[in-house]
Amino acid sequence: MLLDLPIDHFRLLGVSPSAEPEAILRRLQTRCDSPPDQGFTHEALLQRADLLRRSADLLTDPSDRADYEAALLRLSESHPNGTVGLDLPTSSEVAGLILLWEAHGAVEAFQLARQGLQPPQAPALGSGREADLTLLAALACRDAALEEQDQRRYESAAQLLIDGIQLQQRMGKLPDQQRLLEDALQALTPFRILDLLSRDLGDQDSHQRGLTLLDELVVARGGLEATDVDSDHQGSLTQADFESFFHQIRRFLTVQEQIDLFSRWFEGGAADAGFLTVLALTAAGFSRRKPEFLEQARELIQTLANADLDPMPLMGCLDLLLGNVKDAERHFAVLRDADLQAWFLNHPGDRLAAQCEYCRAWLERDVLPGYRDVDASVADLDAWFADRDVQGYVDRLDRKASRQPLTEEVPLDWSTAGTASLDSSFDLGEPDPDAESDDVSVRLPFWQQRWVRPAAAALALLGIAVGGLALVRRNLDYAQLVPETASETTEVEEEVEENEVEEQVRIGASPAQPADEPVASLKPALRPSAPSKPLMSDAPTEAELQALVQGWLDAKALALSGQPADLSVVARDPLLKRVERERAVDAAAGRSKSIDASITSIEVLDRKPLRIELRAQVAYSDRLQGADGAVIEETAPSDFSVTYVLGRDGTQWRLHDYMPGS
């Protein structure tokens, strides 16, 4: 019997078709002096040397070489896609396969060796041929897998290794070689997963096989953050390598597939997958307009036990998206990260604007990227809250939580329009069905209406209808929304009205009373004084904190009355600029304001080395007068609760922000 070996004499010897006889003989000597040392029998190596000499004899004889080259030419012409081969007696089978393997024909050598180990060609048990073919199959299998891997055919490489392992298990002779094949297969797993998941979506069998392998890989590692990985083991991925691999494959998975995987790993004890589950649920909910997913994410994050994770920013963002503005404010107020706290305190807008900006950036940067079916380019909060499903879900949350309704001026039937009308007098109300089609009213996006709802509701309970409208106007930046023709007042008059109401809302005052109604007058001896010394104590006492806040109230009252006052001793620049703008508006209108505000008690809510939050009871009244001294508006004396946030700038404590209520 003959063996058809898919190789020619040039390739078998390892020389080029143009090699001269001297080069061929030198190559023969080198090959004979350097036989493979993996453990083949002496008989197989002698047969290998004999085959090398036969090829060298043929190629160095001019007549024989000419005949052989002519035969190769005829074969290539008649069979252009054929493979040149050599017919060898079966007695030279092992030697020929060894030379084929050495000539980088590992795939063919493995397949022929495996065939030679099966009936009816199977060698006698314990024979040298059996040992040589078993060893050659293992060596050729590993090299064949590497060749396929170099060509990025990872699944083909894996199938070769699986076949080689099964063959070694059946032969039961070379446990060390079997272990090397198993290690190679394990090391190939990430590449196989990437290969299978990145294929065309029509190949669902491959995709599901890739998901199964990914699941098995993470479970075998003990989670996403494996701490006991043996980096010296051939089949192990270091944590850095695994993170790089995981980053690559996520974009080939849908958001639902990631939710299923992360949830399963988390339930199986991989605590590190819980955070990814939260992000995937949020991405699915936001992209599909399914707020119930966000609710699940919110519930899950409260169960995560991770000392390194501050859940407050995430809780704040989820609460904002679900319309829970008070809860969001509470979570953003207790952030661990000092830099993030400073960012919120230094934000040029109000607190709600800062929270919305942070939430949008969080969605675009950390939540939406990394899914095959999610557009991460834009986190559109307007579109989110304009969606009817979102509106309905949030409205159900409102009813479930028994939240207080707004005043009658604010629409509660969001399912019909989802917007409110804003006319030239800034009166929120339902659209007028009798209005002309070219009405100049402005429709507010639902999510913007949603942000101000709890704040406006709280003000309504205090009877501050006008103040609530001003808060809406300030938070939503209607300067860019209202057409110029919609306003019947001058820009200065609008600014005056806004700042007057802002002061009442921020400090928690009751609405201004008409000038002809009797109200309690200010104390005639009111002479507020600005503090002259900054607060530098490392651990301020309650008395020192109360003095600083009272100093802010006194200095602000002094500035708004038109007198010089150095507010920089007690407050940061954004608050100073706010007071300056308010005074400039009054001055432009020829008005002056007298304020009486006193701290009656304080309670420290949170104390950190660089941040102190306290709640103060404030006794407040004010009076707005025209240039002729006539009283335009007056606020009756009332007591209100105000929350103050103090920060330490270097060694000095200053007021960073304040908000009405708790």
Image (spheres, helix red, strand yellow):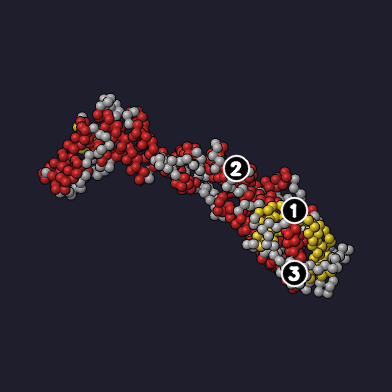
Mark 3 surroundings: few (<14), some (14-19) or many (≥20) residues within 10 A: many
- Identify the disc placed on residue 603: 1
In the image, what residue occupies the spot 60% across and 57% down? 339
Mark 3 in CB contact with mark 1 (< 8 angstroms): no
Label 2: element kind:
loop
The residue to which callout 3 is attached is: 559
In the image, what residue occupies the spot 21% across and 44% down? 14
Q: Is residue 498 left or right of residue 513?
A: left
Question: Is residue 41 among what the camera can see?
Answer: yes
Which of the two residues, 34 or 421, is positioned nearer the viewer here? Answer: 34
Disc 3 versus disc 1: nearer the observer: 1
**Amino acid on which disc 2 is placed:** Ala
Question: Quadrant of the rendered structure where residue 50 is?
Answer: top left
Q: Is residue 464 left or right of residue 157?
A: right
In the image, what residue occupies the spot 16% across and 46% down? 26
Where does the image place residue 502, in percent across and percent down from the top left? 74, 62
Label 1: element kind:
strand
Question: Is residue 385 among what the camera can see?
Answer: no
First reached walking from the N terminus: tag 3 or tag 1? 3
